Amino acid sequence: MRFFGRGHGACPGCGLAIAVRNILEALEGKCFVVNPTGCLEIISSQYGRNAWGVPYIHPLFDNAAAVACGISEALKVLGREDEGEVVVLAGDGATADIGLTLHGMFDRNHDVIYICLDNEAYQNTGHQQSALTPLGEATTTTPAGKLMLGKIGRKKDMVAIALAHGSPYVATSSAVLPADIRRKVKKAAKIEGAKYIQIHCPCVTGWGIDGKDVVKVGNLAIETALYPIVEFENGKLLTVRKVKERKPVEEYLKIQRRFRHLFTSPEGRKVIEEIQKIADENALRYGIDLKK
Amino acid sequence: MRKVVRGFYSVAYAVKLCKPNIICAYPITPQTEIVENLALMYANGELENCKYITAESEFAAASILVGASAAGARTFTATCSQGLILMSEVLFNAAGMRLPIVIVNTNRALSAPLSIWNDLQDSMALRDAGIIQVYVENNQEAHDMVPQAYKIAEDKRVRLPFMICMDGYKLTHAYEPVDLLDQNVVDSFLPPYSPEVYLTTKKPVAFGCYAPPHIYMEFRVAMQRAMERAKEIMEKVFADWAEVSGRNWGGHLEVVYPDSKNFVIAMGSIVGLLRKVVEELRNEGISVGLVKLRTFRPFPVQELRKSLENAEKIIVIDRSVSFGYEGNLSIELKSALYGMSPEVISFILGLGGRDVPKDFLKELVKNAILGKEKSGFKGFKEFEEVIP
């Protein structure tokens, strides 16, 4: 834990902390971290309790990508490129909602590894919905009530957006796959340009799960095909994490408080069917089922 | 090298001489020609160790400079009006992180209604950002201010963003003879940027930590102290500049006819017009002097009190307004002169590029001195507002 850890304030079992440690280990600490406002920033960057062993900047909620572009270009002009990679570690809200400047980074193809730590809502402020909150999740701003059954609409497809921009390397991973994270980050570091990696990070408090179940829940997201683990290089699908026997989405949903309301009404059941449809589409799209 | 150039070129040329590492901007009228000229210099290989980036918005442009500046680069951007307001979240943040970004703001009115023409409403809105603000009267002063801005902003006792405010169109697009500086003059005055603290893997530091109530205030007080130090350091840099360039623009203020009974005070290009007005009124036997306010932040309170200690009447020319109160400079001046007892008459005029002819201005000032003109908006026709 040379690069991240000492004194960080994450909850026991937090997916973010596992992911971040593996990212920094993969880069051997040779990196500049740009971290917009969010869970990670709050747990690691309090004045006097800095948990970072690498150069770190927390600018604003909405501008991490652009700040990273500035660091990347400055290092080039100043002849200091060999100091390390420029890495954004952003939450899902900072990436898919308010992070306006991500598109400019892709468009100009600055040499940055943009990593979205996706815990599927604004968690440090108490679980409000973001564009990466999945269908049916009850958050404090999309609560389950008599009329509404949680978040309406699917997760924004950031992978497709990154690919549409022509990003040279686009991948997803999960906090429960540390070796996969390390491999993909190392690979991204070797590629010039604006890379995008989205890592599924289970959130103990927001999702309503036990710390000891983080790995189980993270794995179920993969085994149900709700969170496809994929990798694209220059727009070409390179690897997909296959599943031997795909599990029904109920297995994933029922052990999390955020989806519990879906099991108590016929309307909720319909939403579960919709969620199953998303999983089936993912499986088909990426060829996730090993048997077929 | 004395040449007849337009204001935007005088700025672009001065920026080039200051050897920035990262220039990043988004086009906005009437600033665009500043960065167009820099882009052309970049395209022709005239900017050494420099990257020119066209951002997707002013918000992104300022953000890119935050990253670049934190990594140890000398940075430049130009903007105005909506662009400055769009940057504002980032600029407040840059000031808090003590990043010496230099900005040229080509003052332009704010929407709505949309106006591409000049007043000072945009930079006034950033008064409390922790950014040094200097207003220039002409294109030579704009040109000369660029190296001084870097020298002041990058001083380790200061480390704050620096905004040079020049009137949009009135200066940016005006042809004026400008003595363009030699590279060796700028080099002898402005050393390369080498900050003590910056982002490097050789000695990792954290920028932009969050501060709970037990420590936040200390950081903000430190910004105020930096502004207070800047006030002293600027005087020294202004004096050094006079020596190096042979042009003395004065200190935080320039006072013309300091022994007058009445004074006019203003900022920016309208000062040029007021010089003429003051001369003409003095020829008519009226005792009137002129205060050109150059530095708006840090606000030179003591200098103003001293210069105006014997003033009986002060006429403030504002080109921006704090809606629900009065002209911005007027508010600041009255606060600075608290306890003194001159009569202060404040005129708000020229909003959104409204023409301010010399004779109109002269009549206003004269009538104010004669006690025949009251404070308020001047040079407009009152709307009959239809409130259904």
Image (tube, coloured by chain):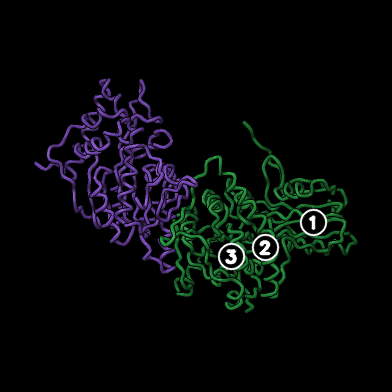
* Residues at marks 2 and 3 on the same chain: yes
Q: Residue at x 57, y 77 (%)?
A: B183
For disc 1, the marked residue is B264
Residue B166 at x, y = what percent?
A: 63, 61
Q: Residue at x 37, y 52 (%)?
A: A3
Which element carries disc 2, helix, strand or loop? helix
- Pick whichever of labels 2 and 1 is earlier in the sequence: 2
Instruction: Say which colour chain A has.
Output: purple
Residue A125 at x, y = what percent?
A: 43, 35
Distance from disc 1 to disc 3, alpha carbons, whole Å, reads: 30 Å
Rendered image quadrant of residue A186: bottom left
Instruction: Using the image, tell me which numbered label, if any, was put on residue B234.
Output: 2
> Residue under mark 3: which chain is it in?
B
* Residues at marks 1 and 3 on the same chain: yes
Instruction: Say which colour chain B has.
Output: green
* Amino acid type of the residue that numbered disc 2 sits on in the rendered structure: Met
Instruction: Using the image, tell me which numbered label, if any, was put on residue B150.
Output: 3
- Pick whichever of labels 2 and 3 is earlier in the sequence: 3
Q: Nearer the viewer, residue A57 or A53?
A: A53
* Residues at marks 2 and 1 on the same chain: yes
* Amino acid type of the residue that numbered disc 1 sits on in the rendered structure: Val
> Residue under mark 2: which chain is it in?
B
Q: Is residue B52 above or below residue A9?
A: below
Report the side of A290 relative to A213 (left or right): left
